[in-house]
């Protein structure tokens, strides 16, 4: 028996942005997602994955998704860096913290997100254009040949069924490739050359049909945890930290070069 059934997905077909006024059917979906969190999060911590849910308990499961800023008909469970780490990054990116109540916004950070929509269940690593500090870090890191090789191996190790693309929104877009396709030759390097910080969403993940066998009630926690664990390797690669800082390489890439021209006297 699948953990999510057609009624759960149908319950999401409502007015975008109004999921907070959920009826009993939507409340059941929220409850199922929160139950997944209570099963998944101890494993995340026990395996040393540095991922954290939204800190307010009532917001752990939310209609807000890092995959778009527009209201959606989806529900998401989002994991990302700690609040302390998030505040450091947002300050470096120029955000002012005028009071302790200033909100940390998940879409400004790389996230690993579980999301249910009317059509799919998705588990994705999402790096929005509003997470520009980390986008620049990734672009700078990929300027170094050994890191391009490491990134290619990380993506290949995910398995051939993951999808990578640069679109935004909760629906699967045609502008994606499978990791199996990206494993051929230098396809991933060429694809990433087109990635533009502060403009593109970068997302890598697995998309499941509502009745996917992998989401059987007895197996869903193992399936989702293993997917999160696989994506965490890529997440750690691109996440800015003081020990994983490639902003200087990014600045060298984007800084205009001026050739000094000798002037005849």
Image: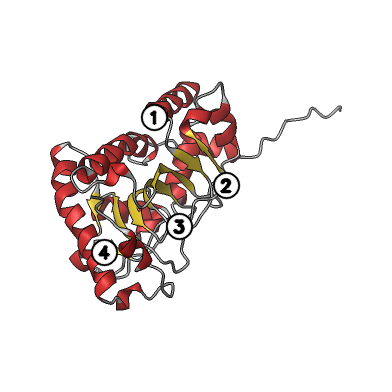
Q: CA distance from mark 4 to mark 2?
A: 28 Å
Report whether 215 appears left or right of 255.
Answer: left
Q: CA distance from mark 1 to mark 2?
A: 20 Å
Find disc 4 in the rendering and name its residue: 29
Q: Position of residue 16 (x, y in %)?
A: 43, 72
One can see residue 197 in this view: yes
Report whether 52 appears left or right of 236.
Answer: left
Q: Quadrant of the C terminus?
A: top right
Find disc 3 in the rendering and name its residue: 170
Name the mark on residue 174: 2
Name the mark on residue 142: none
Helix, strand or loop at mark 4: helix
Q: Residue at x 26, y 40 (%)?
A: 223
| Mark 2, other Cα within 10 Å: few <14 / some 14–19 / many ≥20 | few
| Mark 4, other Cα within 10 Å: few <14 / some 14–19 / many ≥20 | many
Instruction: Give the residue at the far front of this rendering.
Output: 1
Q: Is residue 221 above or below residue 24?
A: above
Cβ atoms at labels 3 and 2 below 8 Å apart: no
Number of disc labels = 4
């Amino acid at each position: 028996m699948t953990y999510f059934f057609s009624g759960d997905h149908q319950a999401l077909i409502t007015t975008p942005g109004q999921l907070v006024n959920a009826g009993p059917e939507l409340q059941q979906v929220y409850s199922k997602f929160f139950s997944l969190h209570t099963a998944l999060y101890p494993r995340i911590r026990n395996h040393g994955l540095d991922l954290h849910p939204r800190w307010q308990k009532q917001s752990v499961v939310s209609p807000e998704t890092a995959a778009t800023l527009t209201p959606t008909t989806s529900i998401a469970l989002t994991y990302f860096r700690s609040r302390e780490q998030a505040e450091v990054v947002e300050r470096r990116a120029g955000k002012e913290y005028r009071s302790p109540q200033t909100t940390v916004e998940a879409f400004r950070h790389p996230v690993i997100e579980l999301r249910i929509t009317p059509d799919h269940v998705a588990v994705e690593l999402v790096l929005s254009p509003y997470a520009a500090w980390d986008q620049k870090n990734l672009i700078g890191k990929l300027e170094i040949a050994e890191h391009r090789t490491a990134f290619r191996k990380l993506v290949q190790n995910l398995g051939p069924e993951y999808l990578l693309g640069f679109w935004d929104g909760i629906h699967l877009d045609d502008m994606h490739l499978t990791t199996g396709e990206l494993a051929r030759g230098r396809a991933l390097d060429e694809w990433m050359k087109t990635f533009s910080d502060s403009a593109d969403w970068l997302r890598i993940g697995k998309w499941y049909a509502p009745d996917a066998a992998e989401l059987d009630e007895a197996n869903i926690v193992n399936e989702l945890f293993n997917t999160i664990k696989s994506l965490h390797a890529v997440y750690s690669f691109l996440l800015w930290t003081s020990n994983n800082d490639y902003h200087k390489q990014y600045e060298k890439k984007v800084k205009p070069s001026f050739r000094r021209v000798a002037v005849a006297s």
